[in-house]
Image (spheres, rainbow, N blue to C red):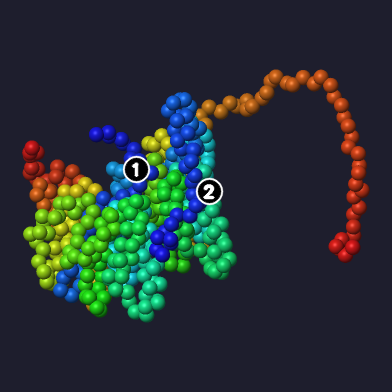
Amino acid sequence: MDHDATADVNAPHSMGTTIIGVTYNGGVILGADSRTSTGLYVANRASDKITQLTDNVYICRSGSAADSQIVSDYVRYFLHQHTIQLGQPATVKVAANLVRLLSYSNKNMLQTGIIVGGWDKYEGGKIYGIPLGGTILEQPFAIGGSGSSYLYGFFDQAWKEGMTQEEAEQLVVKAVSLAIARDGASGGVVRTVTINSEGVTRKFYPGDQLALWHEEVEAHNSLLDILNASNPEPMST
Amino acid sequence: MLSEAMDSPKLGFNFDLYTRNHMLLTKKGLKPPGYLKTGTTIVGLIFKNGVILGADTRATAGSIVADKNCEKIHDMAPNISCCGAGTAADTEAVTDNINSQLKLHRYHTGRESRVVTALTLLKTHLFRYQGHVSAALVLGGVDLTGPHLYTIYPHGSTDSLPFATMGSGSLAAMAVFESEFREGLSREEGINLVTKAICSGIFNDLGSGSNVDICVIEKGKKEYLRNHLTPNPRTYISSKGYSFSKKTEVLHAKVTPLKELVNVVEVVGDAMEE
């Protein structure tokens, strides 16, 4: 591998990413990590990949940062006009289809994987996955980004229909945390957004508060903590 | 309908000469002219009362230092400034262009410009050119909604951050910020930290060098500290100064007085009355 000390800071900004959207009885929960990478350099370690489209619809962005930001800006603009013309809040299905129309017709130029999640009074909580080519799939849960590769088996085993809000939230945080542990392009903090009939709640889980997985060690502030301990552990292979 | 909205207009770059240039480079061994890049370390941070931007002052053309004291902190509005890294012409052009657009927008709305306005204008411009306009920017300012700091990448993506670095020296500067940044720094602490980060870039990155420029933006005022620190003075300066010993020999001198064609008359009172 070519080790170049100076990262190419003009390389396109991509969000390595792990993004998740799950439905529960009463609404949806969207979750994401917070790492944006430019080549091998972490350009932003605390980015917010869960973007608001309307009061009741949010999206998780993955792939090229520029492309996904522009698509979300356009869809927010179209949805705003649609809401004014319709006279009531837009449905999640409309938002998802607007994303799909842009993604599909510009498939040769865009590189974005998007998960649309929200709550409306007709269908309740809904999750739509819109991966690279511009397909639209309504699913009870959706995963995306480079870190999602490590979560297919996990969700096959852990997913249940009709979870409570707490169960669903814990599932999302656990899943993103597992993906962060294995995927180099995902990292930082875990952000979640819960959308239901009552409104929207944002939560934030700092990296050092997440559970430790296989071979992961407790965070230490400095090597001095270990060296100055009464009986420092001998180094082991 | 939607695809029409997204159709790229017939503006942008013309790549018709691409194959011919490629042939000249490979077959005929022609060297292309190097463009002026600002190797650069640019930084920004949010402190208690606003935003502080910092930049080095070296501009390179290949491996030669073309300008030892260039200005990388550009004016966007009375309350907004922008540091630029990448191709010097691109950063200059894009910041000038958006500066003009913001001014027109201020006349149109009658209000102080907002940082997000500058951000949206810059990001839509850069996205349209798909990364070919090589401008990586650190945009900072204070408007009625408070202090804001953004990074803008050549492809058009943006991040909102409390502290940011860009350019070839960004890793060196980020190391300084990550170890010493805190929220709610005072003005003096902020300036010292920014200076430290830029110096880290100047001394550890070959693409950055010379002096440190600072710009402090607070609510209602902007202060540009050009060459706030000059840690790289010229080492050997001749005390004699410049003298050109070999004088040009005068062979022949001819003086032609100019003919007076116009008579200048001083008018007392309001000249426009006539």
Disc ID at residue B93: 2
Quarter-of-image position of residue A91: bottom left
| Lateral position of residue B270 relative to residue B29, left or right | right
Residue at the image position 54 percent from the left and 53 percent from the top: B97
Kindly identify which chain the residue marked by label 1 belongs to: B
What amino acid type is highlighted by mark number 2?
A: Ala
Residue furthest to the bottom in view is A87
Residue at the image position 14 percent from the left and 63 percent from the top: A171
Q: Which residue is mark 1?
A: B171
Mark 2, other Cα within 10 Å: few <14 / some 14–19 / many ≥20: few
Instruction: Pinpoint residue A158: horizontal percent, then vertical percent.
Output: 9, 61
Residue at the image position 19 percent from the left and 48 percent from the top: A183
| Lateral position of residue B166 relative to residue A56, left or right | right
Q: Nearer the viewer, residue A234 or A144?
A: A144
Quarter-of-image position of residue B187: bottom left
| Lateral position of residue B244 relative to residue B115, left or right | right
